[in-house]
Image (spheres, grey):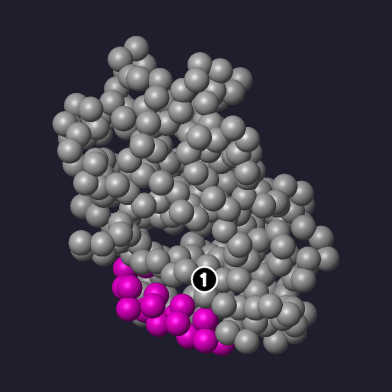
Amino acid sequence: MTPQSGILPPANGHALFTLFRRRLGRRADARLKALLASVSDRITQLQGEDPQASGVLAFGSHVWPELYSSKPVLLRDFPSISGAIHPAPVSEVDVLLHLRGERYDLLHEFADQLSAEMSEWLDVIETVHGFRYRDARDLTGFVDGTENPVGEERAEVALLVDGDWGGGSYIHLQRYVHRMEQWKKLPVRQQEAVIGRSKESNEEIADEDRPHTAHISRVIIEEDGEELAMLRHSMPYGQPGGEKGLYFISYCKTPLVFEKMLTRMVAPTSDGRVDHLLNFTRAVTGAAFFAPSIEQLKQLQK
């Protein structure tokens, strides 16, 4: 099975994240399925103008039964974390269109046209433009995505291999809004203690010197001697003088990795600690999807 084009490639200069919700009383009929099935070929056509363009179309658990007769075993709603002391809201959305490339004008045009064609069935709930900031840094000033897998490991981490849903991937996303004024007031040494890395060099602070509440202390998890991994395609977003933050999105062969990381971020572990980065940013959306292979996506047309 062939994964959708936007899952494995390295980071681009731009991304466009568009979330859709089914319109009340409308179900996925043959016309909508034909539109959905056409997306991968249309992205291929887009590459004629931007060779780096790629994309992913993915579906949530509530709309899935209207599209397919069976589903990936672990496809489920975005997790509700018991005992959370930081918000991890769940958004009522059904479809994700994640576009990537070097020309934002083309991504905008593609999403705008597809949204118009699907408007009889799906409402656009949110569309966010993500962009590369400096040398792949978050707006906090720290490099983002350092722990991402590279080379062949990207596919090993992100894609299911066997079964009907081979070539597919479980997706989780959250849009974070940063409290930039508070963050900027922190001295750099304190910022580094919150993140767990050097701001300038991006070197990881040694375990013995790094606070247990540092962000990387919460999201780096080892089980049976192996570090849990997922493929992130997160990007900064925002308006000058307005709301800004990070659009987090991850791809993985299992939803369990994200669920464990999120739990360690927002809910106290046995030592009572949580992720101190969440004192300076907050999640305002949260959604889970599955991106089927290109072959399974095109099956919708039959």
Residue at the image position 66 percent from the left and 61 percent from the top: 60
Figure quadrant of the C terminus? bottom right
x then y, percent, for residue 25: 73, 80
Instruction: Identify which residue is drawn at 39% across, 38% down.
Output: 278
Q: Position of residue 224 (x, y in %)?
A: 61, 20
Of residue 254 and residue 29, the one placed in the foreground of this image is 29
Between 207 and 215, the residue placed more toward the observer is 215
Q: Quadrant of residue 30?
A: bottom right
Examine the rendering and report whether any part of residue 282 can be seen: yes
Q: In the orientation shown, which residue stands out farthest toward the right?
A: 69
Q: Which residue is tagged 1?
A: 125
Q: Quadrant of residue 254?
A: top right
- Whether residue 168 is situated above or below residue 185 in the rendered picture: below
Judge whether 265 appears above or below 140 on screen. Answer: above
Q: Is 5 located above or below residue 82 in the figure?
A: below
How packed mark 1 is, by other alpha carbons closer than 10 Å (few <14, some 14-19, many 20 or more), is some
Q: Quadrant of residue 210?
A: top left
Relative horizontal placement of residue 186, taking residue 125 as reference (left or right): left
Evaluate whether residue 301 shows in this view: no
Q: Residue at 53% across / 38% down in the picture?
A: 262
Q: Which residues are magenta?
A: 101-117
| Nearer to the camera, 271 or 13 | 271
Label 1 amino acid? Ile
- Magenta stretch mostly in which secondary structure? helix
For the point 63% across and 35% down, the residue is 82
